[in-house]
Image (tube, helix red, strand yellow):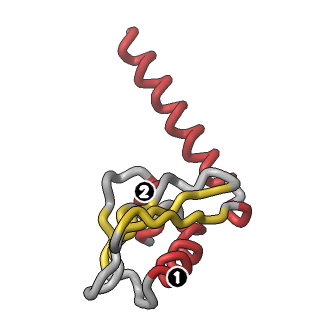
Amino acid sequence: MRRSGWWAACAVWVAAAAAGAQEQDFSKVELKTTELGAGVAMLEGVGGFAGGNVAVCFGADGPVIVDDQFVPMVPKIEAAVRALQDAPIRFVINTHFHGDHVGGNE
């Protein structure tokens, strides 16, 4: 019985987190770009939860990003990446399946 209670609590937490993400006002979130070294930068959400940081690697073949946050953040991510290198995002690497890391894949 204890185990089923734990699973129920986890299910409630996941549902609440998903609902909270859907209610987030992404129009208030801005992306701060920090260049970390030659050809590597980090995009960080400021002003609200953006879904984590995005790593950007850019070079001769075009930009590659690691994780792409939520769907409403995609235009902001694309603009920030274009400011680093005027080329479309070539590849997306997802670290895991949570919506705040893969939502922009849609």
Q: Residues within 10 Å of mark 2 (few under 14, many from 20)?
A: many
Is 32 in front, or is 77?
32
Amino acid type shown at disc 2: His
Quarter of the image where the C terminus is located: bottom left
Inter-mark Cα distance, 2 to 1: 22 Å
> Which residue is located at x 47 percent, y 24 percent?
8
- Which residue is at the far top? 1
Q: Is residue 32 above or below residue 6?
A: below
Residue type at mark 1: give it: Ala
Residue 7 in percent (x, y) is at: 41, 24
Mark positioned earlier in the residue sequence (2 or 1):
1
Write down the residue under mark 1: 83
Left or right for 99, reference 61: right
- Residue 22 screen position, x and y as percent: 63, 54
In the rendered view of the protein, which quadrant contains the N terminus? top left
The outermost residue toward the left is 61
Q: Are marks 2 and 1 in contact (CB under 8 Å)?
A: no
Residue 102 location (% of width, % of height): 41, 61
- Which mark, by number, is residue 101? 2
Secondary structure category for the residue under label 1: helix
